[in-house]
Image (cartoon, helix red, strand yellow):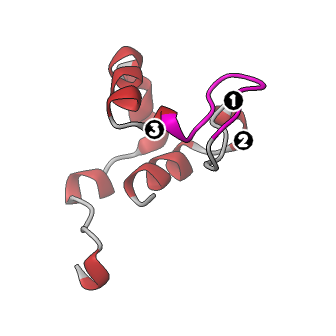
């Protein structure tokens, strides 16, 4: 894609993320969060210091599911 950005695969664009997230695997997500290094910058518990990235503590209360998916796909 232009500007060095990678395109989003079509299968991600056709999903209804407001329903799709209900079938997710939380344990696999936690593992991926650590494996990809997300935890280095994002706080996930109250009063945890982050390294500049937004805190994800109670993200489900502050953001919609489609917004979170978009933020993961296009950080």
Image spot of residue 8 (x, y percent): 27, 62
Residue pictured at 70% horizontal, 33% vertical:
49
Residue under numbered circle 2 = 62
Q: Vertically, is 4 above or below 28? A: below
Front-most of 45 and 50? Answer: 50
Distance of label 3 from label 2 (alpha carbons): 19 Å
Question: Which circle marks residue 27 in the picture?
Answer: none
Q: On residue 38, which mark appears?
A: 3
| Residue shown at the point (32%, 29%) measured from the top left | 35
Q: Are circles 1 and 2 on residues that touch, CB within 8 Å?
A: yes
Residue on which disc 1 sits: 58
For the point 21% across and 58% down, which residue is it? 9
Q: Position of residue 16 (x, y in %)?
A: 40, 46
Q: Secondary structure at mark 1?
A: loop
Q: Which residues are magenta?
A: 40-50
What whole-number distance in Å separates the C-alpha atoms at marks 1 and 2?
A: 7 Å
Q: Quadrant of residue 19?
A: top left
Helix, strand or loop status at disc 2: helix
Image label count: 3
Q: Nearer the viewer, mark 3 or mark 2?
A: 3
| 1 over 42 or under it: above or below | below
Q: Are marks 3 and 2 in contact (CB under 8 Å)?
A: no
Secondary structure beneath label 3: helix
In the shown orientation, is residue 9 left or right of residue 50? left
3D distance between C-alphas at marks 1 and 3 = 16 Å
Splitting the image into 4 quarters, where does residue 64 fall? top right
Magenta stretch: residue 41 in it?
Answer: yes
Q: Could you tell which of marks 1 and 3 lies nearer the N-terminus?
A: 3
Quick one: quadrant of the N terminus? Answer: bottom left
| Number of residues whose C-alpha sits closer than 10 Å to that of mark 1, classed few (under 14), some (14–19) or many (20 or more) | few
Q: Quadrant of the C terminus?
A: bottom left
């Amino acid at each position: 894609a232009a500007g060095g950005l990678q395109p989003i695969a079509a299968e991600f664009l056709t999903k209804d993320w407001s329903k799709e997230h209900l079938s997710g695997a939380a344990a696999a997500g936690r593992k991926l969060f650590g494996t990809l290094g997300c935890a280095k910058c994002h706080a996930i518990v109250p009063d945890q210091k982050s390294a500049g990235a937004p805190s994800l503590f109670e993200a489900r209360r502050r953001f919609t599911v489609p917004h979170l998916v978009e933020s993961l796909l296009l950080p």
